[in-house]
Amino acid sequence: MKKKIRYFCLLALISSGTLSLHAQSTQKVKITGTIYELNEENKRVPLSFATASIPDITLGTTSNERGRYRLENVPTGKFRLSIQYVGKVPIDTLINIDRDLVLNFTMKNEDFKLKEVIVTATNSRSGKSTSSHISRSAMDHMQATSLYDLMALTPGGVLQNQNMSSAQQINIRQLSASSGPEAPMNAMGTAIIRDGAPMSNNANLSAMNPTVLSGSSTTPAALGGGASPAGGMDVRSISTENIESVQIIRGIPSVEYGDLTSGAVIINTKAGREPLRIKAKANPNIYQVSMGTGFELGKKKGALNLSADYAHNTNDPVSSYQSYQRATAKILYSNTFFHNKLRTNTSFDFLYGKDERKRNPDDEQTKTASEGRDAGFTVNTNGTWNINAGWLKTLRYVASGTYTDKDSYYETVYSSATAPYSMTTTDGTVLSNFAGQHIYDADGNPITNFGPEDAGNYAVYLPSSYLGRYEIDSREVNLFAKLTATLFKSSGHVNNRILIGADFRSDGNVGKGKTYDPSTPPYRSVYGHNSSFRPRSYKDIPFVNQFGVYMEDNFKWAIGGTHNLNIQAGVRYDHASVVGGILSPRVNASIDLVPNTLSIQGGYGIAAKLPSLLYLYPENAYFEYINMNELSNSAIPEEQRLFITTTEVQKVDNSDLKIARNHKAEIGLNLRVGKASLNVTAYKERLKNGYMMGQTFDTFNTFMYNEYGRNENGDIVLASSLPVLSTYSKPTNNLNMETEGVEFDLNLGRIDAIRTAFQLNGSWMRTKSWRSGYDFYDNSEDAASKRQPVAIYSQEGNASYRQQFVTTLRAIHNIPRIGFVVTMTAQAIWQKSDWKTYGNDSIPIGYLALEDASVNMFEQGEYTTAQQMKDAGYGYMLQNVSHSNAIKESYSPYFCFNLNVTKEISDMLRVSFFANNMFRSYPRRESKRTPGSYTVLNNRFFFGLELSLTL
């Protein structure tokens, strides 16, 4: 704790010392003017509620009903002045402030009649986090349906056909894995921030018992098709229709943003007046309709912005019984108070989403059906109070509350489902098939063991086949509040902008949880011996509270008046109930080597993601053992046949759980020559203590239970007392990842002679992931009499690799006079490979004893071959390893050609069209066991159309 305090004290000392050096008197001036827009007659008219700000100082104001704005107490120097309004082209200009200024601006509509129309992602400025900015025009041009579609515009983003049939989670600087916990962990560490407040998945518990072993899977699947509780937000629910702009932070984020490891997606929604717009679009998978408008309520009464959309996805017309639907609505009220000193936005968001798999009329065998329905709302208020007194410039606040009701079910006909089930949740309970009846052996000793709470419960032996249905009622509550103070001081060529703030978040679930008919419970796990399921109420789980404080200095020094040195340095401390706290220092820096031409930048930081409810409050593990089964004994009258089971309950301990941390480092250069610009960034990241469900030595327990029979007199007698090793999965920090790569973005600008701009971007990336701890192998059968010790395998040297090199070339041709824009895109994935390496995965290094679960390690080098293991009587510990998953899969070049066309038919009607043509190959397999290779080409064509009406 002392080290953490020293970090804050050091930063405070540097910042205050720097400010003290510049505490000398600095001239203050004011900037005034009028902001105009062009009306239908192309005449200038005042524009109210436009924002005029100087971002470097965080000083801003809003124009009044006459379009007038006023910025006071502005320090002298060179600063960027920004003018913004929804639906208008932002104005960003560098001004030299050396006296009182009167600056008037005329804003243009953000449409496709602009000469410099921006329909691709643009890069962040030097000295800040590496990020991509996506405008409203870019979203309209590509016909984005959800937030997920926008990721294709980032360097290395892969073009995909629009599809909302399954959950969409955003991964930043991470190659998606087909299985395993890597991709969910990256998505979990990606913060989605809308209007200043995070959209959280921390309270998501919609999965069956994650502690039950489920084969090689370490990621709990969501019931009903939504987001996995081990991952991030399902961004299918985020429509782009009411979004004004998006910033995707790929590098080291400001310490203002916490509870993340990968990056952040910052969403700014529309606010203020805009004309009524109605859209309809369709492609082979999705059709969508939307509307939106904004209007002023009168003098000093503010403005109201309304929007709504509906989207329907059917991925396969042949399987029309599977679909996804989304409906959203938003109301946003904005206003200014106290002579434009306080600017506020208050919004209400509604969401409805439905994943549905109706019963296939042709499926008479399994009769499978499922549904996942989300219905929720968010109330958000945020604003900026321009204090502008001394060093203190602004106070920014955000308060948000979200409630989401998630109801889901799954039903199917199970086969080979015979298993015991006794309904109790009490450890050591012994029940028979006669509720409340005590059973005794021949000597009068009690066999059954239960308390009053289990008097109505009984043991059943499930049939081989039955129709099972289980439901999850999840009601997630997410609360967030944040307050940030901005201080600024300028002297000569040195500026300091300091952020000091705190935030609080609380996540919980008040749902009924998992429920089902105890006579038809969920299907048993075939991987966990004797494991069983139980209902669980979510409302009994405590809320998780997180508190964070941060401080950051944004330092700018114009060396010699022309060479800018920018340093963004800060530290953040987060503390959460259960797991404690963590410190996250971060720094970004850049310097101009050649003013306005060449600069270099770099950064290093630690980003931390605190555990969610899934990992903080894991479920108990349940096991069911058969003591006696006479149900098939025809020699005994049916009403007298006994079925007796013992229930073992293991409390899952996660007291050693640590906070996941990602160490991020990058270096890059920015080159600008005329209209052309080149940005290159090399980065390396290492995630430590990543979350996953896994086994440890502590998850094994020896349990003794009795088996009974009848003697020649028909009395019940003890037949045997047997030990079994039970095991389960628990939250661990065993996941580790290393990612390195290079991103580049070359923009040649618009060549006026051919009315065309060219952009080439791409990335090379390699991800290595591995798991610490040990692997365990149990070759036993379910029967207690056939149980064997569990083999221990080392995971040292075992790792998974994924590598990809992708480039994207875009040619943007536009004719402003007729509002015509066409973008031709050619993307190539030159390399995509997946492979694994193995250490000693064929010879165990020890075993867990059956009698007491003790750890017994072999002497190093004691056994080096399978034959030696067999000769020593340990042959049953050898895994039948085929290494089929060790095959290196590499893809031949995969090409995608994309065409986007947008045409302003009139001032009221706009038409957009896109078409994709993908040439893709199946994996080329390479392995020592299978020489040679094969490649199969797959050609896919996809298209879509959008109509937009503006009134």
Image (cartoon, rainbow, N blue to C red):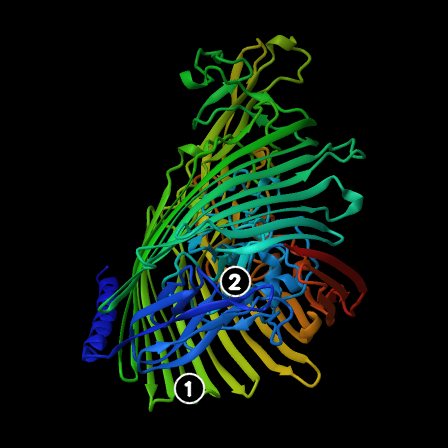
Q: 436 left or right of 240?
A: left
Residue 825: quadrant of the picture: bottom right
Residue 592: image tag: 1
How many circles with numbers are drawn on the protein?
2
Q: Percent x, y for residue 718? A: 51, 20
Crowdedness near tag 2: few (<14), some (14–19) or many (≥20) residues, C-alpha within 10 Å: many
Q: Residue at x 47, y 12 (%)?
A: 438
Q: Secondary structure at mark 2?
A: strand
Q: Disc 2 marks which residue?
A: 246
Q: Earlier in the sequence, mark 2 or mark 1?
A: 2
Q: 721 left or right of 99?
A: right
Q: Percent x, y for residue 537? A: 46, 31
Q: Percent x, y for residue 946? A: 71, 57
Cα distance in 3D space between marks 2 and 1: 27 Å
Q: Quadrant of the C terminus?
A: bottom right
Residue 664 visible in the current orientation: no
Against 483, residue 24 (above or below) is below
Against 128, residue 371 (above or below) is above
Q: Percent x, y for residue 461? A: 61, 23
Residue 498: quadrant of the picture: bottom left
Residue 538 visible in the current orientation: yes
What's the amino acid at mark 1?
Answer: Asp
Q: 589 left or right of 950?
A: left
Residue 468: quadrant of the picture: top right
What's the amino acid at mark 2?
Answer: Val
Mark 2 or 1: the one toward you: 2
Q: Residue at x 66, y 44 (%)?
A: 324
